[in-house]
């Protein structure tokens, strides 16, 4: 459709004004402005104590974004929290010991090719998004999913802009609140628990970073709640609000990749997608189940708040 030049120019000018207003508003957030330039603080010392997070094997990298929870949100607030994590215990009958056994056994099955290793490895690789040179970021993955949905539904420009805006706001708030909770509880990662507590497991490692290099690592921040799970939960709630609860689709984000298992996966609902994404952090070896369940619940709550905003007149 042809647009008169005057309308085109006026629209372009208005777009720039909106962008300038948003950018200038962002500059007033002292914790968020330019934070990508200071992702770690050499002076930050994580709180010590039994069961607490500390720089983790094998990289022992400093804490990533320890103050991100202070960044200004769009709709999330101090009510968006997770329940207290399980109490730390070395007792084999304790709940946390049982939860540590899950990633321990799943990773061992994948490495040995036993049990349901093929599917578990596929899920772990499919949702990893941890390798900067190969994959999306964990949050960026759901922008890519949104793009697939826009193309599948042939949404109008206005509808597409709305969906991107909802998801972008939700993912931003999900990251802020998840990181707030991470550094509130400072819960250790499964790899430290397994190596320190379980017998004959001092050489156990994850299968994280599916780039075929054989290099494995653990994210440099506390475990509880899972950021992956929170991002997936908020995206699923927003997609459900726009396209419906029982929406079947196939995620082709990694189709054709050869460095890892990127074969498309099909879901009968967005919540099924979110819960599989959350679960995927167990067979990859970097989260307890409580991290996944609390993270996805946190994301659902934030997504509901985003969907309640007055998106249309």
Image (cartoon, rainbow, N blue to C red):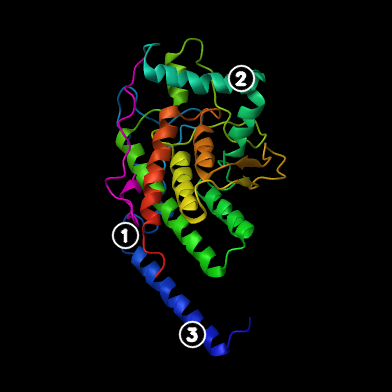
- From which residue to which does the magenta span run? 66-90
Horizontal side of residue 105 vs 186, given as left or right: right
Q: Quadrant of residue 81?
A: top left
**Would residue 160 be visible to someone looking at this image?**
yes
Any magenta on residue 180? Answer: no
Residue 280, percent from left and from top: 54, 33
Marks 2 & 1, CB-CB < 8 Å contact = no
Q: Quadrant of the C terminus?
A: bottom left
| Residue at the limit of the structure toward the left, as seen here | 78
Residue 125, percent from left and from top: 61, 35
Please give the residue where the numbered disc 1 appears in the rendered image.
Answer: 29
Is the residue 199 above or below the residue 103 in the image? above
Any magenta on residue 82? Answer: yes
Horizontal side of residue 179 vs 129, given as left or right: left
Is the residue 168 above or below the residue 136 in the image? below
Q: How far is disc 3 from disc 1 in space, using C-alphas?
A: 30 Å
Please give the residue where the numbered disc 3 appears in the rendered image.
Answer: 10
* Labels 3 and 2: the sequence-earlier one: 3
Badge 1 local density, few (<14 within 10 Å), some, or many (20+)? some
Horizontal side of residue 26 vs 287, given as left or right: left
Q: How far is disc 3 from disc 2 in space, using C-alphas?
A: 61 Å
């Amino acid at each position: 459709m042809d647009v008169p030049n005057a309308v085109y120019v006026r629209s372009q000018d208005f777009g720039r004004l909106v962008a300038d207003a948003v950018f200038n508003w962002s500059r007033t957030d002292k914790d968020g402005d330019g934070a990508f330039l200071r992702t770690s603080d050499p002076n930050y010392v994580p709180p010590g104590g039994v069961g607490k997070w500390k720089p983790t094997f094998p990289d022992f990298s400093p804490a990533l974004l320890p103050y991100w929870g202070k960044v200004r949100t769009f709709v999330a607030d101090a009510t968006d929290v997770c329940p207290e994590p399980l109490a730390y215990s070395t007792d084999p009958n304790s709940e946390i010991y049982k939860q540590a056994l899950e990633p321990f056994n799943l990773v061992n099955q994948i490495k040995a090719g036993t049990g349901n290793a093929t599917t578990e490895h596929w899920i772990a690789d499919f949702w990893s998004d941890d390798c900067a040179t190969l994959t999306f970021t964990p949050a960026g993955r759901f922008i890519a999913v949104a793009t697939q949905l826009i193309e599948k539904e042939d949404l109008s420009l206005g509808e597409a802009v709305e969906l991107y805006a909802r998801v972008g706001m939700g993912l931003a708030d999900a990251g802020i609140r998840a990181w707030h909770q991470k550094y509130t509880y400072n819960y250790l990662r499964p790899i430290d628990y397994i190596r320190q507590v379980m017998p004959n497991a001092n050489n156990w490692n994850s299968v994280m970073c599916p780039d075929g290099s054989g290099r494995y690592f653990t994210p440099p921040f506390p475990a509880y709640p899972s950021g992956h799970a929170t991002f997936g939960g908020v995206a699923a709630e927003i997609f459900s609000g726009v396209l419906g609860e029982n929406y079947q689709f196939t995620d082709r984000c990694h189709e054709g990749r050869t460095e890892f298992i990127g074969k498309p996966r099909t879901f009968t609902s967005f919540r099924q997608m979110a819960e599989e994404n959350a679960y995927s952090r167990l067979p990859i070896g970097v989260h307890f189940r409580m991290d996944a369940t609390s993270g996805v619940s946190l994301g659902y709550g934030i997504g509901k708040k985003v969907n309640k905003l007055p998106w249309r007149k």
